[in-house]
Image (cartoon, grey):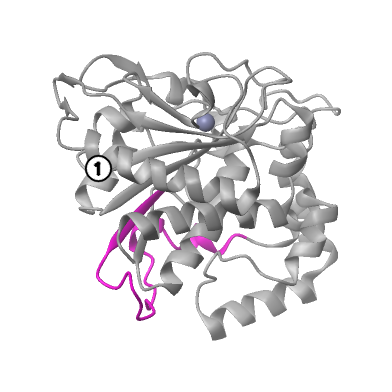
Amino acid sequence: MRYDDSPPPPESASSISPDRPWFARRPALAVALAALAPTCLAGWVLTQVLSGPASGAPQPAAAPLAASSPAAAADAKPSASAASPAASRAATPAKGPLTGRTVVIDPGHNTGNFKHGREIDQQVDIGTNRKECDTTGTTTNSGYMEAEFSLDVSHRARALLEAKGAKVVLTHDGERPWGPCIDERARIGNQATADAVVSVHADGASAGNRGFHVILPARVKGGAADTAKIVGPSRGLGERIASNFARTTGSSPANYLGSGTGLVVRDDLGGLNLSTRPKVFVECGNMRDDKDAAQLMSPEWRQKAAQGIADGITGFLGG
Ligand code: ZN
């Protein structure tokens, strides 16, 4: 979402009403599934023990299920990442054109942020200003969360980049109850000395506003923020992602900002202002527009989105 002007989520997840959105019911549903299918769960655990942590990559068998019922698919697949913090995930990278390169992917928001308003509202220093630690992100009108979308696309992009040999670090992998804060998100990219950092989002604009855009860092200086060295390379990264994203998804650049270029420069995002590595945000579409939302909710479309992002990064890194 665009942090400052997106509409609030349709309903707080702190609600306990029986008609609260599906995502708020997920823990109960997961418990029910576990209770009803102990054999399946045991089988899954055994599989994990034998095969090691799941990669988080898209699984072909899960795609048709996810297409018909994303919530059911997500609930039926336990999150192996909970026991495997993103930053310490030990992957055996393939040899490829990106061997030796490090990419940090930042899945926007966190599905738990809805339940941690006090924590994510805390102000953090972004150098030029102070700003909320994090935000909830937006949802589609049917309740599909931006945070779930961004984590799924990030997993898919990670798999594509690892297949080319890159070391990929996620800023979070659903293993934490909320956050990280935007300053920590930036710090993870900096400390990884990432060759490229991409923050994955979807927007929450009015219906009728459609298409994707890539947000580039403005030149800012203040406190810990100094983007002078990353403005140029970040534009190179963003332009490559925009062109590849358009190609792989068939989506058009946003029709409501960026003058049709699919590129927007902003000086108010802590995740960009505090970055010392080339970094952009990708707003993959508008969750509040039903046509865009239908794409964002499609696993097949999300794979195309991840491909565009990964291809853009690969092109930027000369792979
Ligand atoms: Zn967002």
State the count of labels.
1
Residue 228 screen position, x and y as percent = 15, 30
State the residue in front, 221 or 43: 221
Tag 1: amino acid: Pro
Residue 157 in sight from this viewpoint: yes
Would you place residue 28 above or below residue 219 in this image?
below
Q: Residues within 10 Å of mark 1 (few under 14, many from 20)?
A: some
Image spot of residue 135 (x, y percent) = 49, 25
Residue 106 percent location from the top left of the image: 42, 45
**In the figure, is residue 71 to the left or right of 193?**
right
> Eyeballing the image, is 247 above or below 146?
below
Instruction: Identify the image quadrant of the C terminus.
Output: bottom left
Q: Residue at x 19, y 39 (%)?
A: 276
Q: Quadrant of the N terminus?
A: top right
Residue drawn at (26%, 27%) of the image: 273
View extreme (bottom): residue: 50
According to the picture, the residue beneath numbered tag 1 turns out to be 233
Q: Check if residue 15 falls in the magenta segment.
A: no
Q: Nearer the viewer, residue 138 or 218?
A: 218
Classify 288 as above or below 64.
Answer: above
| Residue occupying image coordinates x 66% and y 24% | 14
User: In the image as oriented, which residue stretches furthest toward the front?
Assistant: 260
* Residue 104 falls left or right of residue 13: left
Residue 104 in the magenta stretch? The answer is yes
In this rendering, would 302 be left or right of 290? left
Q: Which residues are magenta?
A: 79-105
